[in-house]
Amino acid sequence: MDYEKIQNAANFLKKRYQEQPIIGLILGSGLGVLGDEIEEAVKIPYNEIPDFPVSTVEGHAGQLVFGLLNGVQVVAMQGRFHYYEGYSFDKVTFPVRVMKELGIQQLIVTNAAGGVNESFSPGDLMLITDHINNMGSNPLIGPNDSRMGVRFPDMSEAYSADLRKMAKEIASNLNMKVQEGVYVGNTGPTYETPAEVRMIRNLGGDAVGMSTVPEVIVARHTGMSVLGISCISNMAAGILDQPLNHEEVIETTEKVKASFLQYVKAIVAELGSR
Ligand code: HPA
């Protein structure tokens, strides 16, 4: 990971947007609409930012959105980079490093995920308590640049207990049900086989997806606190007697959009008032 490139991208963004964002948001499949809620927005397409990768998946706008969410200065990634698109882990996590360089200390990561825990239902929101890296590699492999973080980062609180407690209180204030559980990150792009879903359940996974894990590893390397929220868009393969498809994922995120937006905005307002 080239620190000069990270600084270069961050300096470019600081020139384009002079306020100091305090919260970073990564918006998952179908959840990019949150970026449209940002007021006084300055939108910067990824292809204008030096060394930024460019997104290829449908339903991902591919821009950084700076501005006010519920009165709080934020920067949101509308569209993320996935390992299955062919990007290296360095590319996938580059925006997280840039956010850190912009001064972000708190990162809210969202995704659409398959429900592995049979007590979950499509449309549930799940606070991520922890993750299992099942992607076969780690974005920190390679020489460690100590300007960015330590060689052997602690992952005992990958997802901040403090932020999760706050998020649970907000859910209860809003009368919203939120689940909690362990997110398992696979590479994709295939959905899992039913046997893999049984394995994931036996290993302690509650939800499965194709993102988030690399970004959170890098966020923790840089010392950011992370709050993770999965939208359970479907039950994982083999649980219901029906095949999976991307349209279903988008349909469900579309249905929960309103409550998801309300929830994340309330969380951001609380973080901004701290
Ligand atoms: N598996 C993996 N990734 C996903 C799923 C799933 O069932 N749903 C949404 N993203």
Image: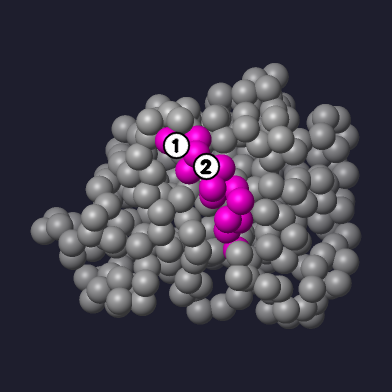
Dot 2: element: helix
Q: Amino acid at mark 1?
A: Ala
Disc on res. 167:
2
At 28% from the left edge and 61% from the top edge, which residue is drawn?
117
Percent coordinates x, y for residue 120 in the rendering: 27, 52
**Residue lying at the far top of the rendered structure:** 40
At 82% from the left edge and 65% from the top edge, which residue is drawn?
148
Residue 73 in view, yes or no? yes
Do the residues under discs 1 and 2 have CB atoms within 8 angstroms?
yes
**Viewer-proximal residue among 217 and 182:** 182
Check if residue 65 falls in the magenta segment. no
Q: Amino acid at mark 2?
A: Ala
Which span of residues is magenta-colored?
A: 158-172
Percent coordinates x, y for residue 200 in the rendering: 33, 73
Left or right: 267 in relation to 250: right
Quarter of the image with the N terminus in it:
bottom right
Tell me the chief SS of the magenta region.
helix
Quarter of the image with the C terminus in it:
top right
Q: Residues within 10 Å of mark 2 (few under 14, many from 20)?
A: many
**Viewer-proximal residue among 180 and 42:** 180
Disc on res. 171:
1
Left or right: 177 in relation to 128: left
Left or right: 273 in relation to 119: right
Q: Residues within 10 Å of mark 1 (few under 14, many from 20)?
A: some
Percent coordinates x, y for residue 221 in the rendering: 72, 66
